[in-house]
Image (spheres, rainbow, N blue to C red):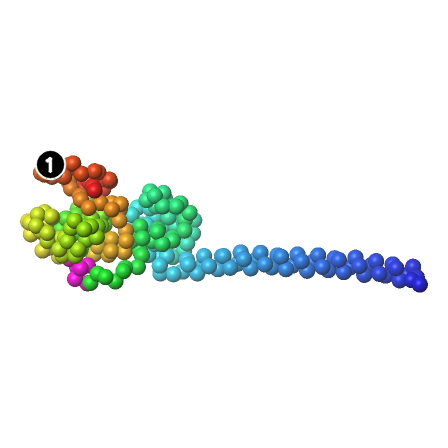
Amino acid sequence: METKVQKKSFKKFKRVFILCLCLMFTFVLGGTLYAVNYSAETQVAAVATTSENKQVQQKLKELGYYNGAIDGIFGTQTISAIKRFQRDYGLTVDGIVGKNTLAKLGLGTTSGKYSSSDIYLLAKCVHAEARGEPYVGQVAVAAVILNRVKDPNFPNTISGVIYQPWAFTAVNDGQINLEPNQSAYNAATDAMNGWDPTYGCIYYYNPVTATSQWIFSRQTVITIGKHVFAI
């Protein structure tokens, strides 16, 4: 038969046991939450120190979205710049540099189907046709050439598109023979990596200097710098 002392001791033990369980549960839950938060912070820190993140910052700076240091730190200033870029280019505004955002920035992975001579020729055409245009306008010209390569109504090679008779003024007047600068190379590479500021256009023209009435009948998609881009 239990004595009063035994009952009291059991109740005390029970209270202590329940208290220990609560403390253990709190410790485990808190540790789990901390681990999740720590993991997320660690991942952000890891991304912030990569060269890829510096490339994103550099590209955003070239396009006028970022004016901070190219330090690879994925902070609020970089995220805000990414969101502004995403908003302007019709992407999901989440501040995350995913596949689509990388492609629009021209930082995706090339398909490998273009040779060094293709890049050189595309850069030459960009330089000859758009060296006075803003950088995004240079990428746009390269994108039009690549869009034509994919279009069944045009030759299926970069050289075929560029040297198609009367396709580009720069070929007719000899400016295609000028050596491209680094900006033209970058624009050609960005377009090859998937950045298309024209949204699939296959024509562009300067409305001030264009002489063909036919080109004015094409549907305008976007105007970048002095060039109108159409389909």
Rendered-image quadrant of the C terminus? top left
* Image location (x, y in percent) of residue 100: 35, 51
User: Residue, x 10% and y 53% (percent of image)?
Assistant: 163
* Image location (x, y in percent) of residue 63: 29, 47
* Image location (x, y in percent) of residue 92: 39, 46
Decide if residue 135 is in sight here.
no
User: Residue, x 19% and y 59% (percent of image)?
Assistant: 119
Residue numbers of the magenta segment: 116-121
Q: Is residue 117 magenta?
A: yes
Outermost residue to the left:
173
Outermost residue to the front:
152
Rendered-image quadrant of the N terminus? bottom right
Q: Is residue 194 magenta?
A: no
User: Residue, x 37% and y 57% (percent of image)?
Assistant: 53
User: Residue, x 51% and y 59% (percent of image)?
Assistant: 39
**Majority secondary structure of magenta residues:** helix
Locate residue 74 relative to residue 176 in the image: left or right.
right
Task: Name the kind of residue labelled 1 in the image.
Answer: Gln
Q: Would you place residue 14 above or below residue 198 in this image?
A: below
Q: Which residue is mark 1?
A: 213
Decide if residue 144 is in sight here.
yes
